């Protein structure tokens, strides 16, 4: 479990591969692209160092019947990193609140991947009245494995990790992204090679800080206030969990994710296999069907 948890820390990044309906807008630390012009609202949030490219197939499917907004956090996917310091998770959360108020969206569904899912779960705990549900794609209120250490130990580990990750050179960062995509990101080696070059577009220091904040936080207590439907998608690729400290069955992984979400009043966990962290890339059809089912159940 420890090895599995630590390897998930490596980042993702991206480049937009399709055109939005209009020019992106910026609110606080968020860049927002709109796709589609009718139907209910869906907000897509990429993960650590990620960009809109991860949602390309998802947007193409959803924009026919929904207004789809794709967010990019400052410092990710070639955007300017925050310059005023402070907690980046707090800034992203505040920016999301400000944008939803300004845009006057009627209770959108938040769909987040990885760190983006953690942000969506936090937002559901703080502002459940502003949204109609959350789909969390392999992102949790506490980083897997960190339920086994104390708060103090977790924060110390996070600080050390930030120091190490932020010291990477651009070439080292590129190598990290390739290793990540090959070992954790996707099953298909060709997909790993295709997307790994996009991963290093993000600001190294901002990526390290977002990762450390994600690693240090424990959002489980606040989930008691997240009284909206929550669907957690747990990817599973059997060879990755066949032996060693990571060994577990597909059902055991689902049960572990359920335990981390146990404070949420209306949370469910489903598994999609065979898949690694980027479910929407490894299993686009299964992912889209699962997402469509959730949207239909909420709306």
Image (cartoon, rainbow, N blue to C red):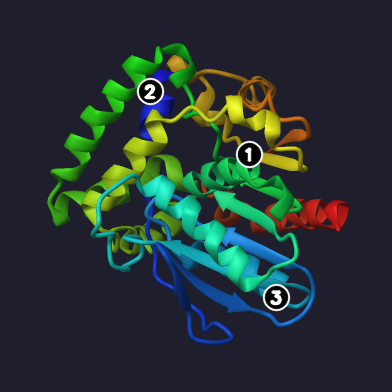
Q: Where is residue 74 in the image (x, y as percent from the top left)?
A: 36, 61
In the rendered structure, the answer to whether residue 98 lies left or right of residue 208 reads right
Cα–Cα gap, marks 2 and 3: 38 Å
Look at the numbered discs 2 and 3 and tell me whether their residues touch, using CB distance below 8 Å. no
Up-down: is 147 above or below 126? above
Reading the chain from its start, which is encountered first: label 2 or label 3?
A: 2
Reading the chain from its start, which is encountered first: label 1 or label 2?
A: 2
Picture quarter with the C terminus: bottom right
Q: Where is residue 6 in the image (x, y as percent from the top left)?
A: 36, 28
Q: Residues within 10 Å of mark 2 (few under 14, many from 20)?
A: few
Cα–Cα gap, marks 3 and 1: 27 Å
Name the residue located 59 percent from the left edge and 77 percent from the top edge: 34
- The residue that label 3 is drawn on is 63
Look at the numbered discs 3 and 1 and tell me whether their residues touch, using CB distance below 8 Å. no
Foreground disc of the pair 2, 3? 3
Quadrant position of residue 81: bottom left
Tell me the number on the disc at residue 125. 1
- The residue that label 2 is drawn on is 3
Quadrant position of residue 281: bottom right
Q: Where is residue 31 in the image (x, y as percent from the top left)?
A: 45, 70
Cα–Cα gap, marks 1 and 2: 29 Å
Helix, strand or loop at mark 3: loop
């Amino acid at each position: 479990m420890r090895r599995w948890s630590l390897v998930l820390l490596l980042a993702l990044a991206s480049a937009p591969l399709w055109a939005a309906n209009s020019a992106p807008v910026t609110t606080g630390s968020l860049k927002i692209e709109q796709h589609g012009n009718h139907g209910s609202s869906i907000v897509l949030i990429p993960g650590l160092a990620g960009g809109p490219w991860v949602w390309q197939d998802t947007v193409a499917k959803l924009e026919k019947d929904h207004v789809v907004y794709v967010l990019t956090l400052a410092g990710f996917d070639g955007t300017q990193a925050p310059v005023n310091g402070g907690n980046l998770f707090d800034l992203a959360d505040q920016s999301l609140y400000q944008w939803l108020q300004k845009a006057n969206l009627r209770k959108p569904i938040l769909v987040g991947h990885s760190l983006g899912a953690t942000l969506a779960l936090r937002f559901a705990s703080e502002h459940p009245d502003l949204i109609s549900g959350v789909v969390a794609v392999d992102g949790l209120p506490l980083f897997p494995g960190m339920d086994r250490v104390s708060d103090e130990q977790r924060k110390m580990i996070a600080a050390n990790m930030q120091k190490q990750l932020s010291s990477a050179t651009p070439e080292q960062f590129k190598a990290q992204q390739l290793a990540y995509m090959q070992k954790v990101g996707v099953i298909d080696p060709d997909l790993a090679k295709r997307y790994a070059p996009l991963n290093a577009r993000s600001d190294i220091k901002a990526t390290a800080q977002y990762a450390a904040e994600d690693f240090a936080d424990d959002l489980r207590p606040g989930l008691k206030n997240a009284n909206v439907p929550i669907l957690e998608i747990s990817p599973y690729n059997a060879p990755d969990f066949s032996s060693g400290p990571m060994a577990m069955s597909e059902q055991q992984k689902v049960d572990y994710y359920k335990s981390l979400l146990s404070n949420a009043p209306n949370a469910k966990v489903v598994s999609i296999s065979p898949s690694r962290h980027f479910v929407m890339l490894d299993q686009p059809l299964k992912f889209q069907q699962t997402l469509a089912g959730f949207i239909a159940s909420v709306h």
